Image (spheres, grey):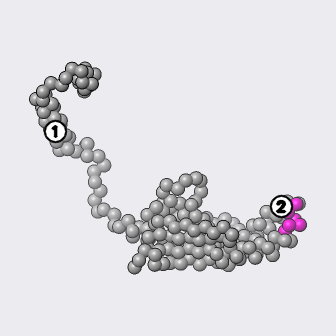
């Protein structure tokens, strides 16, 4: 299997268009100025959100998560799976009424607040999230069976070996010819340990 072969392709729920139009209608409805615009918003909002939804795409491949969206300004992001640190699920009360989830993707090294990618209306969002995280974990390989000691400086054998090495270095330095007195290394401050 090549790394660009799709493992899973996300599909988006058409209810997300109604959700977007409803949230816009609520925003227009709470202001007096927005009430006349509400009559234009519903048909134009439905048309625009359907176009936006038609351009949304989310594909999981062997090594990356590819997301495309946008109407006039098209955005495409390819997120390497090993960079994904968290995938969050958000569901507010209005989303719950429509049966929708917001899936957020956060990565290592991402700048700014919030998620790198936010997808609303992905069908089977919990299962898609688990598939992405399972593929990410499969890339990293199995966890080691035994963990290394937290610090090698606590191991007596290691401390003894370091002590013996320092004694050999000290003996080699004392056996070497004297350094010139105008050398910066020959200052009394540098000879102190």
Q: Is residue 125 visible?
A: no
Of tags 2 and 1, the one toward the viewer is: 1
Q: Nearer the viewer, residue 112 or 181?
A: 181
Residue 176 in the magenta stretch? The answer is no
Q: Which residues are magenta?
A: 33-38
The secondary structure that most of the magenta stretch takes on is helix
Question: Eyeballing the image, is 167 above or below 154?
Answer: above
Q: Where is residue 97 shown, x and y percent of the image?
A: 70, 72
Q: Where is residue 84 shown, x and y percent of the image?
A: 48, 62
Question: Eyeballing the image, is 49 above or below 156?
Answer: below
Q: Residue at x 29, y 46 (%)?
A: 151
Question: Eyeballing the image, is 46 above or below 23?
Answer: below
Tell which circle, 2 or 1, labels the residue nearer the N-terminal end. 2
**Secondary structure state at the residue bearing disc 1:** helix
Question: Disc 1 marks which residue?
Answer: 165
Q: Residue at x 25, y 26 (%)?
A: 185
Q: Quadrant of residue 26?
A: bottom right
Q: Residue at x 83, y 61 (%)?
A: 30
Question: Disc 2 marks which residue?
Answer: 30
Quadrant location, the C terminus: top left
Q: Around disc 2, counting alpha carbons within 10 Å, would you say few (fewer than 14), some (14 to 19), or many (20 or more)?
A: few
Q: Is residue 23 visible?
A: yes
- Alpha carbon separation for disc pair 2 and 1: 77 Å
């Amino acid at each position: 299997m090549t790394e660009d072969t799709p493992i899973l392709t996300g599909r988006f729920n058409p209810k997300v268009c109604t959700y977007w139009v409803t949230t816009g209608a609520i925003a227009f409805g709470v202001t007096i100025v927005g009430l006349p615009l509400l009559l234009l918003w519903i048909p134009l909002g439905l048309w625009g959100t359907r176009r936006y939804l038609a351009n949304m795409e989310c594909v999981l491949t062997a090594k990356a998560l590819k997301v495309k969206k946008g109407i006039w300004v098209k955005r495409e992001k390819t997120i390497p799976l090993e960079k994904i640190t968290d995938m969050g699920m958000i569901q507010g009360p209005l989303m719950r009424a429509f049966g929708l989830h917001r899936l957020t993707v956060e990565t290592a090294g991402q700048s700014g607040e919030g998620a790198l990618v936010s997808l609303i209306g992905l069908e089977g969002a919990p299962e898609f999230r688990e598939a992405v995280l399972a593929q990410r974990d499969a890339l990293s390989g199995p966890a080691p069976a035994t963990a290394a000691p937290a610090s090698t400086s606590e191991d007596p054998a290691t401390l003894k070996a370091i002590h013996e090495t320092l004694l050999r270095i000290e003996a080699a330095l004392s056996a070497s010819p004297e350094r010139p007195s105008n050398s910066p290394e020959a200052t009394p401050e540098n000879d102190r340990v």
